[in-house]
Image (spheres, helix red, strand yellow):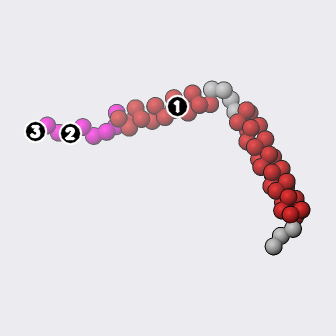
Amino acid sequence: MTHPDTHLALHHQRAAELRAQAETHRLATSARRPGELRTRLGWTLVEVGLRLAAAPKPVIA
């Protein structure tokens, strides 16, 4: 059986760790360039287009 004060101290420590992780994630996402999603989407569309253009065409006999 654990002592309630020990449990509370562990809870506070974990809560502080989670807040630090959330802050790190928030800073990382805010540091991204605003057009990053647009750029990734554009390159994905280019890749899909190249795959469609390179797809073998069925031979009609």
The answer for how far apart the CA atoms under marks 3 and 2 are is 9 Å
The residue at which mark 2 appears reads as 58
Badge 3 element: loop
| Tag 1: amino acid | Leu
- Report whether 23 appears left or right of 48: right
Residue 22 image position (x, y, % from top left):
75, 43
Rendered image quadrant of residue 56: top left
Task: Write the residue at 77% across / 37% down.
Answer: 27
Q: Is residue 24 visible?
A: no
Tell me the quarter of the image containing the C terminus: top left
Task: Write the residue at 87% across / 59% down.
Answer: 9
Q: Nearer the viewer, residue 11 or 21?
A: 11
- Report whether 53 appears left or right of 39: left
The label on residue 22 is none
Give the vertical position of 14 relative to 23 (above or below): below
- How many numbered marks are there? 3
Residue 47 image position (x, y, % from top left):
45, 35
The residue at which mark 3 appears reads as 61
Asked if the magenta segment contains residue 60, the reply would be yes
The span picked out in magenta is 53-61
Tell me the quarter of the image containing the N terminus: bottom right
Badge 1 element: helix
Give the vertical position of 14 relative to 44 (above or below): below
The residue at which mark 1 appears reads as 41
